Amino acid sequence: MIVIIDYDTGNTRNVKKALDYLNIDNVLSADSEVINQADGLILPGVGAFKKAVDALNERQLIPVIQAAAKSGMPMLGICLGMQLLFDRSFEFGETAGLGLIPGEVVAIPDDLGVKVPHMGWDQNQVTQPSVIAKGFDQEATYFVHSYYVKTSEKYTLATCDYGVTLPSIVQKDNVIGMQFHPEKSGQVGLNGLLAFKELVENGNYSRN
Amino acid sequence: MLAKRIIPCLDVDHGRVKKGVNFVNLTDVGDPVAIAAAYEKQGADELVFLDITATNEKRPAIVDTIEQVASQVFMPLTVGGGIHTVDDMQRLLKAGADKVAVNSAAVRDPQLITAGAEKFGSQCVVLAIDSKWDDATKRYQVYVNGGRQATDLDVIEWAKQGVAAGAGELLVTSMDKDGTKTGFDLPLYQQLTQAVNVPIIASGGCGQVSHFTDVFAQTDVDAALAASVFHFGELTIPAVKQALKRNGVTVR
C-alpha cells in the first residue's frame, strides 16, 4: 500500500486519481500509524514552501516522514513535495525542509530571458541511469514552479535546461523527487509512477 | 526549452460537449471524457473547458465533468466560464482542474484575481480577455459577457492590471479574428507580449497549419488555442506539430 500524505495541498487528489487509474493500491492519509505501515510514501505539494512546512507541522508529520525515510521506506516527493525533501528553502525567507537530501531551494533567476514561473512542457535529460528516470530521457513533462533545487550531481538523475540547469529527478537511496508533475505528464509521467511502484515492490534502488 | 503548447478548447453545456466532435472512432461525440482522451492521444498539451451554461444558472455539472475527465486524462486542464468566487475556483481545482480562467467577473471585481492568486498561487489563475479593435479610438477594447458587452477597458492596460493583480497567464481571444479562419491576430499578440511577462495563449482565427507557425514565428506567445478546426478534423494536432517542428518551433 502506498500512502499519499494528505496535508491539504493542491495536487493530492490528482496524484490519487493517477494511482487509481494505474491500479496502484493507495490511500490518502495524515495518520502516523497508517504512514508507519506503508510500503511507500508519496509527498505531493503545490504552493509555497513555508505554508507546506507549516501544514506538515500542524499535523506533526515531519518527524514521522523523517523516521519513515530513515527506516528505508521508498518515498517520492512531487513538485513542492520534492523541494521539501531538501535542507532549506529561500522562498519568502529561509525555511528548514525535511533534510533528507542535501541541498537547498532557490529562486529561478528571472534575468536570464526566461519567464518565471517555469510553466509548461519541458524536456528532461537523464544524467544517471536508474529505475526511476529510465523513461524520461529526451521526454517532455509538465512543470509548474518558480523555485528550483540546488544539489550535488550525485543526487541528480535528470535535469531540465531553463536558463539554469535544474534537477528534474533526484534520488538519494530510498528518497526520490520529481520537480515536474508525473500525474499531469501523460503516459510518460504515468510510467514514472509505475517505476516508483516497481521500486516499492522490489526495493531495488540500483542506479542501473 | 519550454515547448510551445497547442490547446484544444471544448465548450461544455450541462456536462456535454456542445456541437460534438467529429473524430474517427469516437462513438459518443458529446462525451467530454472520450473527447479529452482522444485529444490526449493526439498529443494535445493542455485542454481548456469552457462552461457555456455559465452565468445565470447555479450548476455543479462542470465540476462533475472535470472530476470525470481528471480521473482518465492526465494532462493540464483549465476551466473557464461562470467563475465568480474563490469558492467556485476551489471546487474546480479540487475536482482536478489545474487552472481556472476568469473573465467578466474579474472585470467587475479585479480583487477576484488577487484573492485566487493568494489562495492557490498565480499559476492557477488565468485571466481570459475578449478583445475587439475599436477603430474610433484606435485601440483594442475589452468585451465581457461572452463578447456581448463592451467595456471602457483597453486590452493592453487591462492585461497589465490583471498581471499586477496576480494573474499567472493570459488567454486572449481576438473577436475580430474569431471564426474567420484568416489567422491569429498577430499585432495584438505582439503588443501583449511586450506589455507583460506572463505566458499568453493566443485564441481566435486559425484555419490552417501556417497560422500556427505564423503566430509562433512572429509573436512571443506561449500557446495557441483552437476549437472547431480540431473538432471537425480539418487540422490534426500531429500535423500542426510537425509543421511547427519543421519551422524550428520547439514542441513536445
Image: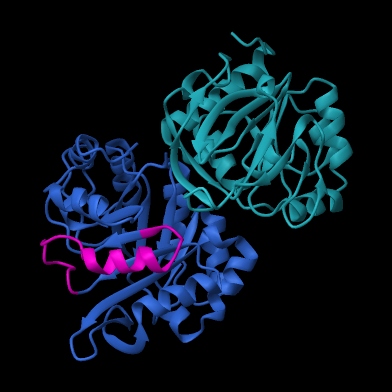
Q: Is residue A86 above or below residue B133?
A: above
Residue B15 in view: no
Q: Which residues are magenta?
A: B176-200
Q: Which chain is blue?
A: B
Q: Is residue A200 magenta?
A: no
Which residue shows up at 34% across the image and 59% down it?
B201
Q: In the rendered view, does A17 fall on the left or right side of B241?
A: right
Q: Is residue B178 above or below residue A152?
A: below
Which residue shows up at 12% across the image and 51% down it?
B208
Chain A colour? Answer: cyan
Residue A156, position in %: x, y?
Answer: 63, 24
Which residue shows up at 63% across the image and 46% down it?
A12
Residue B150 in view: yes
Q: Nearer the viewer, residue B39 or A113?
A: A113
Q: In the rendered view, does A192 fall on the left or right side of A154?
A: left
Residue B89, position in %: x, y?
Answer: 53, 67
Residue A23, position in %: x, y?
Answer: 53, 29
Q: In the rendered view, does B11 fall on the left or right side of A133?
A: left
